[in-house]
Structures are given as C-alpha cells and as structure tokens.
Amino acid sequence: MTITDTGRPADLVLEGGGVKGLGTAGAVMGLLDAGWTFPRVAGTSVGALAAAFAAAGADSATFGDVLRRLDLRRIPDRRVPLPLISEGVSLFVGRGAYAGDWIHQWLTRELEGLGVRTFADLRRDDPGADPALSTPDHRYKLVVMATDVTNGRLLRLPWDYPRFGLDPDEQLVADAVRMSLSIPFYFEPRTLRNPVTGDEATIVDGGVLSNFAIEIFDRTDGLEPRWPTFGVRLLPDLPAGLGDLVPFFGLPMFPPVRLLEQVVATALVGRDQTHLERPGVRERTMAVDTRGTSITEFGIGAEKRRALIGRGRQAAREFLRNREQQLVGS
C-alpha cells in the first residue's frame, strides 16, 4: 500500500535509539492504524530506518511483515567469525567493531520491494511548502540525519548531497540510512567523496549532533502549518536517561570518568532536550517506554520484542487520545 492524500496528514520525526527502535515501529504502526499519513518523514539512526519505510509508503501490515523479516541478531556482523578478535581487528582497521553490511543489504532489498532505490523515488512536489523547503534539493519525502566528523557538521540527506558535488536524485536511500546508523566505534563509519575535488568526509551516526530533529519541517515564513508534526522519542530526559546512553552507568567510578560520561551524554542529547522545553514541542511528541532495553541489545528475545512494539502502539494511541481531548477543549 502506498501513502495517498486521503488520510489525515502529519509530518513525522523519529528519534534514534538502536534496538529501542522496535518501539518506534510500533508507534508508527499505531499512527497508520488510526488513519494518519506522512507527507514528509525525518529520522536519525534507527529512526531513519523506520522513516525510510514510512516515506516509501509502508502501511501497518507492511511494517509488521518487515519486522518479521528483520533478524536483529545478524546486525552486529563480524568480519571474521572470531568473537573479540574480530571486533578488535575491525576497530583497528575499520574504526568500528562491526561492519554494518548485513543491515545495509537487508534494507536495500526491503526498500526495493517497495519500489524505492534512490532518492528520486521519494521526490515530492508541493507548491504550498515553505519556500525554504521548496527548492529542488529539498523536495523529498525523507530526510536522514548523519554527522560529518571531518567537517564538523550535521548532514540532512538528501538535502546536503550537493555539498559533496552529488546529485541527490542519484543517491541510494539505503546508503544514507546506513550512514545514520553508524554508531561511533560500534559500526564502521561511512565515507562521502566529492567526485570533482576528491575530498572525502567520514560520516557517523546522526545522533552525535541531532538525535531528534523535531523542528526540521517547521515553517519559517510566518504562515500557519497546514498539518501537524508528530515526533516519536525513545530516550528519557537526562539525568534519568544517562543509563540509556552511557555503558556501565551506575557502577562505581572515579569522578573524572563520571564527568566524562555526563559530558558525552549531554553532547548527544542536550541540544534536543533543550529544544523540547520550547512551548508546544512536547505537546507534539509521544514518548515510548523503552526502559529495560539497551541500545545494542540485538539478542532481544521474542516476548520482549513484541512487548516493545506493543508499547510503541500504546504510546501512539495515548498521544492521539490526548491530542483529541486538547483540540476539543481549545
């Protein structure tokens, strides 16, 4: 099924969070079940993964089928079948413990099954869009967040491909999502190369600079939005969410190490958390309860997996119910 204009439209922004993203899928399925459609979708890391399927037109049943074909245990793919040795060699040679090839190949196949290969397949023409989002480089259903650590900047793909002399229409959607999935030191980073200058940039997880870009589709021309933006969050606010971001949180550590943990966590989510405090932002954001699931828990059991998807659906239902009550009362 493809998205049409017959449902209730809302732009969608999906936070990153590794395996917690099963909750994201549940939330998106809940919104689809309620009749919402998504003209534009943005996501970071696993949020970009779910966003790609939403932008490709997957309905709730298709999301369920995709999840059943997703073997999480294969995502941490070793270069050689030697635990610890493989991770060590890969870190030294490839700058990441795991190759990340399996999820890239899986995503390529799944998107091609929905008729999506390059960003040209996700083009959208919208005469009523904000002028800032109506230039040719911005006319796409999907925006993926990635981090260019060579040049120290956030990338919004496909919007920023021209910075590298690349035609957005010709770039593979699965490539952009794989860039956004590049958790530093866990998955090997990707490289973008300018074909004219030969300059290369190392690209890692978009969550390093923007894990929840809820403002990305907001109008800048002073006009009222034509439809709402909905956001899906997976990580709790700091300081309660430190354990979801920092390994070994809660164990006895020297004060300098604890400070380093806090600095890293703040660097990852501080910008987004600050933006959430702006008026009206939390009101358009649903939070999925992902407690008890770690970001890299790829060996998650079937029962826990179903429960996490179910909590995502429940978060969407509660969000929509509260939203309707607010609209009735206003």
Image (cartoon, rainbow, N blue to C red):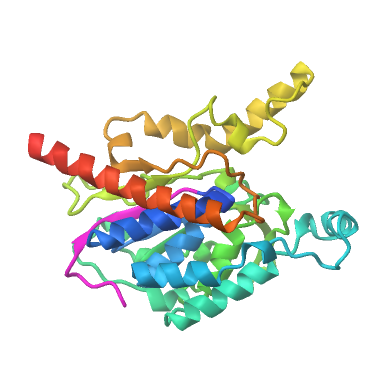
Q: Is residue 125 visible?
A: yes
Would you identify the image quadrant in which residue 169 lies?
Answer: bottom left
Residue 13 within the segment the image draws in magenta: yes
Position of 270 compared to 61: left or right?
Answer: right
Residue displayed at 48% across by 71% down: 66
Q: Which range is magenta? A: 1-15
Residue displayed at 78% across by 21% down: 253
Would you identify the image quadrant in which residue 275 lies?
Answer: top left
Closest to the observer, 219 or 26: 26
Would you identify the image quadrant in which residue 166 lies?
Answer: bottom right
Position of 9 compared to 231: left or right?
Answer: left
Picture coordinates of residue 113, whole percent (x, y): 47, 82
Point out the residue furthest to the front here: 303
Q: Which quadrant would the N terminus be assigned to in this image?
A: bottom left
Picture coordinates of residue 305, whole percent (x, y): 53, 55
Q: Is residue 220 visible?
A: no
Picture coordinates of residue 229, whole percent (x, y): 28, 49
Closest to the observer, 159 or 116: 116
Residue displayed at 27% across by 71% down: 125
Q: Which quadrant would the C terminus be assigned to in this image?
A: top left
- Classified by dominant secondary structure, the portion drawn in magenta counts as loop
292 in relation to 168, above or below: above
Residue displayed at 45% across by 40% down: 289
